[in-house]
Image: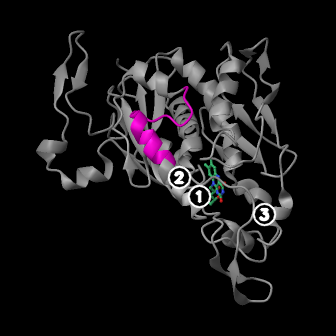
């Protein structure tokens, strides 16, 4: 299924080199004004062809809204948007059905779909399918912002270069959420670019980690039974992002090295009488329920599988071992373009927490 969500559901369709890709979003509240220029600005943050850190494929990524909006306001009916594919070089992929790319979906998809999968540009497995996800996320985040929920992400690391950890203050998150390839420390961004360029020049690719923070989430949301906790909701959509290979919340895997006395976040009452914690190792979630502290999570992105370097593969038609040289235009690092994708997935996850829009939870 390429559908996700219960309260607000997104269904994504299309292939990288088909005529168009798009989505249908159901369950959005009626009466919400949507600024389509702001949506386009989010699409532009993810669009290909931005710089040497991204694929040279050029796409305007201008969504055409077919339903669900009247005079720029949601009407309660399914919101459908279509994004044209205009800059395809399908011949670059002609050899890949027979000789699958190591690290990509080609071989398992060939087995599962008996060779009928669309291999061109990665077909339905392509990172391009995250454009409609960003469209939907950009709509959701406008609705969330009106409820005081602000989210933003940055590149925490690329290869061996690490940025400072996020301070999830609303103003800082808002600044991150409009930038292309946001990094907190400017010199670290230069070093990340160098890391990406070195990989690209060596006909290789590189991975990294994106850290996301969400401020303004009330306490007491989520935790719908043992398997419906906030981490489960977030993880299930985040792992839908191609190349996302790990998700951790708060102290995450680092918590495994701590004592309880170090990892537990001590409670206190702030000046307004709200219950807060001195630290936030929980990442804003305990028992699958929001604590009222900012939600903080990190996503690990593997290095782009399509690399120009010769790689060992197999020829599925001759049943012989062979060497593959991948052609086509690819991102040397997925992290810069995936930042708005992670934010968008988080916005959809938030929209699926019961009570997020009606303020029923304790604040
Ligand atoms: C924004 C974005 C851009 C991507 N660009 C590429 C690319 O240029 N070349 C490529 O081989 N994979 C790219 N990917 C990753 C593949 O789509 C992904 O690795 C592949 O579908 C296999 O899925 P998996 O890595 O989740 O197992 C991109 C992913 C994202 C999120």
Disc number at residue 119? 3
Residues marked 2 and 1 touching at CB (< 8 Å): yes
The residues bearing labels 1 and 3 have C-alpha atoms spaced at a distance of 23 Å
Examine the rendered structure and indicate whether residue 44 appears above or below residue 209: above
Q: Nearer the viewer, residue 124 or 40?
A: 40
What residue is shown with label 1? 200
Q: Nearer the viewer, residue 325 or 144?
A: 325
The image quadrant where one finds ligand 1 is: bottom right
* The image quarter in which residue 108 lies: bottom right
Q: Is residue 179 left or right of residue 167?
A: right
Nearer-N-terminus badge (2/3): 3
Pair 1/3: label in front: 1
Q: Which x, y percent locates residue 119? A: 78, 63
**Bounds of the magenta segment:** 178-193
Query: Residue at horizontal 63%, vertical 29%?
Result: 42
Q: Does the rendering let one see residue 300? A: no
The residues bearing labels 2 and 1 have C-alpha atoms spaced at a distance of 6 Å
The crowd level at tag 3 (other Cα within 10 Å; few <14, some 14-19, many 20+) is many
Q: Is residue 68 left or right of residue 244?
A: right
What residue is shown with label 2? 196
Residue extending farthest right: 19
The crowd level at tag 1 (other Cα within 10 Å; few <14, some 14-19, many 20+) is many
Secondary structure type for disc 1: helix
Q: Which x, y percent locates residue 194? A: 49, 49
Query: Residue at horizontal 58%, vertical 60%?
Result: 201
Asked whether 327 falls inside the magenta stretch, the response is no
Q: Is mark 1 within 8 Å of ligand 1?
A: no
Q: Nearer the viewer, residue 83 or 5?
A: 83
């Amino acid at each position: 299924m390429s559908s996700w969500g219960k309260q607000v559901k997104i269904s994504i369709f299309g292939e990288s080199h088909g005529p168009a890709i798009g989505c249908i979003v159901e369950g959005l509240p009626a009466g919400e004004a949507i600024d389509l220029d702001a949506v386009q600005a989010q699409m532009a943050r993810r669009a290909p062809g931005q710089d040497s850190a991204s694929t040279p494929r050029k796409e305007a990524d201008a969504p055409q809204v077919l339903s669900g909006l009247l005079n720029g306001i949601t009407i309660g009916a399914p919101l459908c948007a279509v994004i044209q594919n205009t800059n395809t070089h399908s011949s670059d992929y002609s050899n890949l059905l027979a000789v699958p790319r190591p690290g990509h979906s080609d071989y398992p998809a060939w087995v599962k779909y008996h060779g009928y999968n669309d291999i061109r540009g990665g077909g339905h497995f392509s990172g391009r399918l995250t454009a409609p996800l960003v469209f939907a996320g950009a709509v959701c985040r406008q609705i969330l912002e009106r409820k005081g929920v602000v989210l933003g992400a940055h590149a925490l690391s690329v290869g061996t270069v690490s940025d400072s950890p996020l301070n999830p203050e609303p103003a800082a998150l808002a600044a991150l959420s409009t930038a292309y390839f946001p990094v907190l420390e400017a010199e670290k961004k230069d070093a990340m670019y160098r890391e990406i360029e070195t990989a690209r020049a060596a006909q290789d690719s590189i991975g990294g980690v994106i850290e996301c923070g969400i401020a303004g989430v009330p306490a007491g949301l989520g935790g719908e039974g043992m398997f419906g906790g906030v981490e489960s909701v977030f993880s299930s959509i985040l792992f839908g992002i191609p190349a996302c290979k790990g998700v951790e919340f708060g102290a995450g895997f680092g918590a495994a090295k701590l004592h309880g006395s170090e990892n537990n976040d001590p409670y206190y009452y702030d000046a307004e009488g709200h219950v807060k914690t001195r630290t936030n190792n929980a990442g804003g979630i305990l028992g699958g329920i929001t604590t009222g502290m900012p939600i903080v999570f990190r996503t690990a992105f593997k290095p782009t599988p399509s690399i120009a370097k010769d790689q060992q593969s197999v020829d599925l038609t001759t049943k012989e071992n062979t060497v593959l040289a991948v052609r086509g235009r690819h991102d040397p690092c997925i992290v810069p373009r995936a930042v708005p994708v992670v934010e968008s997935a988080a916005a959809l996850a938030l929209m699926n927490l019961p009570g997020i829009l009606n303020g029923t939870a304790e604040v």
